[in-house]
Amino acid sequence: MWEFTSPRTIVFGENALEYLKAVEGKRAFIVTDKVIKKLGFADKVAGYLEEAGVKTEVFDGVETEPSAENVMKGAELARKYCPDWFVGLGGGSCMDAAKAIWVLYERPDMEVAAINPLEKLGLRKKARLICIPTTSGTGSDATWATVITDVKDCRKMELISREIVADIAILDPELPKSMPPRAVGDTGLDALTHAIESYVSQWRNDFSDGLAIKAIQMIFKYLPRAYRNPEDKEAKEKMHNAATMAGMSFGNSQAGIAHAMGHSLGAIFHVPHGRSVDFFLSYSIEYSAREAMQRYADIAREIGIEAKTDEEAVKKLVEAIRKLEREVGAPASIKEWGISRQDFEKRLDELVTRAANSSCTFMNPRVPDVADTRKLIIYAYEGKKVDF
Ligand SMILES: [Zn+2]
């Protein structure tokens, strides 16, 4: 038996935000950050909710890669306000924070680290969740995971519960128009990594497969356009939808070693999530192909690559990914991005241990041991072709 969990309602397309005018409730607690507030999005969301007769309060204190302390502070304010809606507005950090704040609001007896698939949280007794992404990549609006940083331990906690999925996801293509090109590239490549890792995951299933393939096709087609021209409405909308589809897909299968190593690099060197996972995507394919040749070849053929053998298809897929990365300005290796060899070597043991222990590692089609994880991280640092 298998279960597919996704938001109950996904509102998308032009003017999707206006859906808020019809939301029923009393008080909404909008969880966002200072940048999004400054762009006027929080006021816009609040304005629509007030038209629906819902009072609002904005918490704009979400930090990039939110910590447990940050989330506790938000929950304390929420408890004073007593909302019946939470609205996660922003990139992955804001939506992940909204999920965690919501849990702590309904369950003041709990610590955020205790969120896990086996724990019955009993949410929705007091409030429900709306997620509104302003970037096109994380898919957090569609997943039942939240990533919270444990500052003391310099560790990213990947916390999972089917209960924390949003009730409503609103994908308005107007919002990601404000993303700078670098963020368009990074978040778009994150979405691509979600979809590819999902398609080859050991937990893949018919439902996650369909969403993954469609998202991959859309990302290859529209990401370069969205990167080059923020006014390209069609490309922006397609990328926004593709990111959520990829989120629904990997949320119901699992990410793989590009995420395991990316989370580790991100926590230690403070690399933005999209960029850190992308550093490892092509290397993870070269490494994993031995165990998932047919699956990667499927992906290659679905994006129009012609090849006589599966091996050739996979080789061309890796080339196509590297070409796409160059088109959207992603550095070819971690070294090129600017982490010095000395800093890298000093933290290498830690990078390896964290990646090897990540839950994402175990669902990868080929599960690397500690020695292979170390080699892979070094190869990604150097930008070397994986040959083991
Ligand atoms: Zn990701």
Image (cartoon, helix red, strand yellow):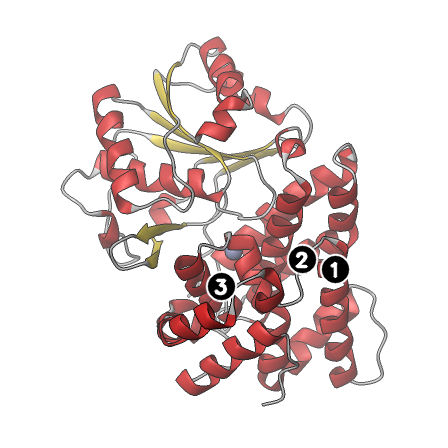
- Tag 2 near tag 1, CB within 8 Å: yes
Q: Which amino acid does label 1 sit on?
A: Arg
Return the residue nearer the eye: 348 or 277: 348
Residue 33 lies in quadrant: top left
Residue 61 lies in quadrant: top left
Q: What residue type is labelled 2?
A: Ala
Q: Name the residue under label 2.
A: 330
Q: In which quarter of the image is the N terminus?
A: bottom left
Circle 2 residues within 10 Å: few <14, some 14–19, many ≥20? many
Q: Mark 1 points at which residue?
A: 326
Q: In the image, is 256 to the left or to the right of 163?
A: right
Q: Residue furthest bottom?
A: 388
Q: In the image, is 382 to the left or to the right of 366?
A: right
What label sits on residue 262 in the rendered view?
3
Give the Cα separation between the discs numbered 2 and 1: 6 Å
Q: Where is residue 276 in the image (x, y as percent from the top left)?
A: 53, 60
> Which residue sits at x=37%, y=40%?
97
> Which residue sits at x=44%, y=39%?
95
Circle 1 residues within 10 Å: few <14, some 14–19, many ≥20? some
Which is nearer the N-term, disc 2 or disc 3?
A: 3
Return the residue nearer the eye: 241 or 125: 241
- 388 w.r.t. 70: above or below: below
Q: Which amino acid does label 3 sit on?
A: Gly
| Residue 101 seen in the current view | yes
What label sits on residue 135 in the rendered view?
none
Tag 2's secondary structure? loop
